[in-house]
C-alpha cells in the first residue's frame, strides 16, 4: 500500500526516544524526509543515523521543548533541509510520577511549557505552510491517562488532557484546508519510559520489577507489552494520504488495556 508520504517532510518532536525513533523510522520508510528533534544530542544522532542507514533522508536538531523562546528559530532550521514540514508528530516525554495534589506552581508551569505549549507553539508556526500546501498532518502522542487516569501520574494525567481538547478543536478549524489533527494514545509499549515507571512502582511497593511487569502484562488482553514499531505503524497511517478522512480522533494503541468505552 502506497501511503502517499514520499517527499512530504515530517518533523518528529522527541524523535530520539523509543517511540519517537520508531515513528521517525516508519515515516522515513514511506519516503518522508525526517527532521529529528530531541533534547539529547546523542539520541538525535542515533535516530538520524538509523534513518540514513535504512535508506531514508534525515536531519537532526537539538531542541529543548521547554525553551519556548527557541521555537521560531528551530522551526526555521527544520524547514531548511527539505522544505517546511507538512507532518508534525509530537512526543514530549513526561513528568516524574507524583500525586496530583501538593505540586508546586513551578512544576505545573515547567511541564505545561514542555509538554503542552511546545506542541501548540510549533503547530501554530507550521500551519501557514500546511494551509498553503492544502495538506498537513498533526499527530500528538499523549498517554492512556487522558482516558483513564493513571495512579501516581497526576501531572501527566491533568496536563495531557489539554492536548486532547486543543487537537479536537483544531481539527474543525483546519479540516477545510486538507489538514488533519489526531491524538494517539499508547498503552503499555515496551520503551525505556515504561521500564522506568515499572521500576518506580516496584520501589514504592517493595516488589521486584519483574513482578510489577508481570502484573501489568496480565491486565493486557493480548498478553504482552506492545512493540514500538506497532505504535509507529499507526502513526504512519494517520500521517498518510489514505487517512485523509480521519480527524479529531483519539486513537488507542493499547492491546485492549483501557477498559472504558
Image (cartoon, rainbow, N blue to C red):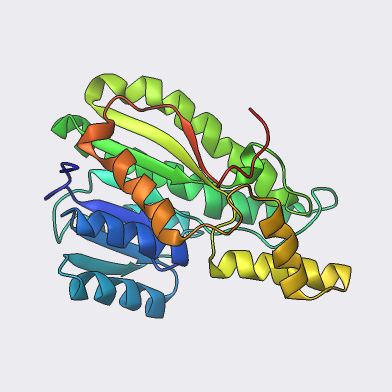
Q: Is residue 73 visible?
A: no
Residue 132 picture quarter:
top left
Which quadrant: the C terminus?
top right
Please give the name of the residue rendered at 39% of the width and 20% of the height, measured from the top-left corner. Answer: 172
In-front residue for pair 15/79: 15
In-front residue for pair 188/192: 188
In-front residue for pair 71/163: 163
Residue 194 coordinates in the image, percent (x, y): 61, 64
In-front residue for pair 230/47: 230
Q: Is residue 93 visible?
A: yes
Instruction: Say whether residue 213 is left or right of residue 136.
Output: right
Residue 94 picture quarter:
bottom right
Residue 113 coordinates in the image, percent (x, y): 55, 51
Please give the name of the residue rendered at 17% of the width and 65% of the height, measured from the top-left corner. Answer: 56
Residue 193 coordinates in the image, percent (x, y): 59, 66
Please give the name of the residue rendered at 20% of the width and 76% of the height, measured from the top-left corner. Answer: 53
Instruction: Say whether residue 234 is left or right of residue 85.
Output: right
Looking at the image, the residue that sits furthest to the right is 206
Residue 259 coordinates in the image, percent (x, y): 68, 36
Looking at the image, the residue that sits furthest to the bottom is 42
Q: How many marks?
A: 0
Please give the name of the residue rendered at 44% of the width and 74% of the height, measured from the top-left corner. Answer: 40
Amino acid at each position: 500500500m502506497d501511503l502517499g508520504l514520499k517527499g512530504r517532510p515530517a518533523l518528529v518532536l522527541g524523535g530520539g526516544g523509543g517511540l519517537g525513533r520508531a515513528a521517525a523510522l516508519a515515516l522515513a520508510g514511506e519516503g518522508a524526509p525526517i527532521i529529528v528533534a530531541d533534547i539529547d544530542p546523542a539520541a538525535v544522532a542515533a535516530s538520524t543515523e538509523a534513518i540514513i542507514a535504512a535508506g531514508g533522508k534525515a536531519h537532526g536538531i537539538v531542541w529543548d521543548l521547554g525553551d519556548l523562546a527557541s521555537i521560531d528559530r528551530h522551526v526555521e532550521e527544520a524547514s531548511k533541509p527539505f522544505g517546511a514540514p507538512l507532518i508534525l508528530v509530537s512526543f514530549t516525554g513526561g513528568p516524574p510520577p507524583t500525586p496530583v495534589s501538593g505540586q508546586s506552581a513551578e512544576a505545573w508551569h515547567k511541564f505545561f511549557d514542555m509538554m503542552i505549549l511546545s506542541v501548540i507553539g510549533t503547530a501554530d508556526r507550521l500551519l501557514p505552510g500546511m494551509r498553503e500546501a492544502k495538506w498537513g498532518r498533526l499527530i500528538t502522542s499523549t498517554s492512556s491517562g487522558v482516558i483513564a487516569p493513571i495512579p501516581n501520574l497526576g501531572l501527566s494525567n491533568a496536563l495531557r488532557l489539554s492536548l486532547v481538547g486543543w487537537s479536537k478543536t483544531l481539527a474543525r478549524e483546519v479540516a477545510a484546508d486538507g489538514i488533519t489533527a489526531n491524538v494517539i494514545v499508547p498503552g503499555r509499549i515496551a520503551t525505556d519510559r515504561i521500564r522506568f515507571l515499572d521500576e518506580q512502582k516496584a520501589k514504592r511497593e517493595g516488589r521486584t520489577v519483574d513482578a510489577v511487569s508481570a502484573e501489568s502484562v496480565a491486565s493486557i488482553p493480548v498478553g504482552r507489552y506492545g512493540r514500538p514499531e506497532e505504535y509507529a505503524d499507526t502513526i504512519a497511517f494517520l500521517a498518510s494520504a489514505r487517512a485523509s478522512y480521519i480527524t479529531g480522533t483519539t486513537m488507542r494503541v493499547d492491546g485492549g488495556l483501557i477498559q472504558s468505552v
